[in-house]
Image (cartoon, helix red, strand yellow):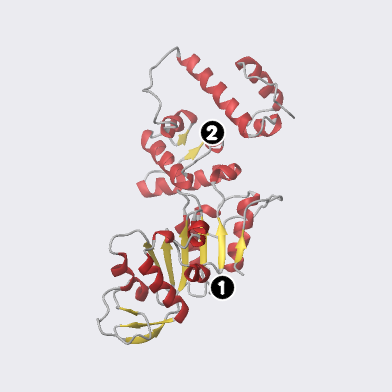
Amino acid sequence: MADTVSLAGARSARVARAPTGALELIGRSASIGRVQEFVRRIAALDGGVVIVAEPGADVESLARELHAHSRTAAGPFVPIACGADGLDRLLFGDPPVKMPPDLEAVSSDSRVAAALGGTLFLQDVAELPAAVQARLARIARDGEVRIDGQPVATAIRLIAGASIGIDADVHQHRFRHDLYRRLSASRIDLPPLRDRAEDVPAIASRVLEDVCAARAVAPRTFTQAALALLAALPWPGNVAELREVVERGVAATHEETLQVEHVLPALQLDRRTSAFVPAGTLREARLRFERDYIAAVLQHHGWRMAAAAQTLGIQRPNLYRKARQLGIPLARVSD
C-alpha cells in the first residue's frame, strides 16, 4: 500500500518550519505541518513519489526538496515537462534501431541517462502519451536499460507532479495503473493556499525576498496591513498567482515597504469587470475599500470577531466600532 499523507482533517497546529527552501513547505499551519513531517520521513527512501496539487502550486520546489534530502542528493536532478514537444526524444533519445528486446533502449543524450544516480522529475505526469507511459513503466519495472547498447542499472528516483484528476485518470485507464503504482510508493497531497491562509504572509515575504534578489534591488518588506490583505484572498492560482502579484507590486514602486496601496493595483482581482472609472474623493474611496476589506476578512473567518481582529491587527472593540461606522452588518458576528 502506498505511503500517503492527506491534508483533510488536520486538527492540531504545528510549529515546524520548512526543512530548507521549498516555498510549498513554508508555514506553521496544521495542514502544511503534516506535509513537512511526511517529507522528512520519506525523503531518504528510494521509492517513487507523486505530488498531487492544484494548478499554480510550486511542485518542483518540493521535488527538489525531496531530492536534496535523498540518498542520491549528490546526483543530478533532472526535470522534464511531460507535455513538451518531442517528449519521446527528450526522455529516451535516439537509440540504435536494432536492439535485443530484453530491455528498453535509450541513448546517452537522453534525460533518462542524464538522471542516472539522481532524480527524474516528471512535471504534469498525466500528460504523458500512452507509448511513453509504457516505456517508463518497463524501465521502472526492470530497473535496467540499455544505454548506447550496454545494459546499465537505472538507479533513478522518480518523482511526479500530478493534478487532482490523477485518480480518475488511473481509474478510467487514461494513465497506466502499473506506472502509477510504482510512482506512488509515497503520495503527497499539497493543500491549496486558500486552506492555509495563516501561511500566506510567510510565503509572500519569502517570494518578495526572491523577487528582489532576482531583480537585483534592495530588500523590501510588506506592512502588516498588506500581509493581512494577501492572507484574506482565496488565491485560485496558488503560489504562481501570489508570485505574479508580488512581482507587479515590486515593479510598481521604489518604496522599501510595500503597503496596501501598492498591493491592490497588482491584484487584478477580476479582469472581467468593466474598466475602472474614478468616482468620489480619495477619502470616499478609502472608506469603500476599508469596508469591503473588513467585510472580506470577517467572512473569511466565519464572522468570528476575535480571529478577524487578529488578522487586521486591531483590538476587537475597535473592530466592532469600525464595522458599525462603516455599515457592515453584524447579525452573523460571533465572539
The furthest residue to the front: 172
Could you say which is closer to the camera, residue 86 or residue 13? 86
Which residue sits at x=54%, y=47%?
A: 192
| Upstream in sequence: badge 2 or badge 1 | 1
Q: Position of residue 252 (x, y in %)?
A: 37, 33
Q: Which mark is residue 45?
A: 1
Could you say which is closer to the camera, residue 17 or residue 279? 279
From the image, tell me which residue sits under label 2. Answer: 229
Q: Is residue 307 visible?
A: yes
Residue 38 placement, left or right of 178? right
Q: Position of residue 180 (x, y in %)?
A: 50, 67
The furthest residue to the top: 280
Which residue sits at x=53%, y=67%?
A: 184
90 relative to 56, above or below = below
Q: Quadrant of the C terminus?
A: top right
Residues at discs 2 and 1 in contact (Cβ within 8 Å): no
Q: Secondary structure at mark 2?
A: helix
Q: Position of residue 241 (x, y in %)?
A: 44, 43
Residue 75 placement, left or right of 70? left
Q: Position of residue 57 (x, y in %)?
A: 48, 51
Mark 2 is surrounded, within 10 Å at the Cα level, by few (under 14), some (14 to 19) or many (20 or more) other residues, namely: many
- How far separated are the C-alphas under marks 2 and 1? 40 Å
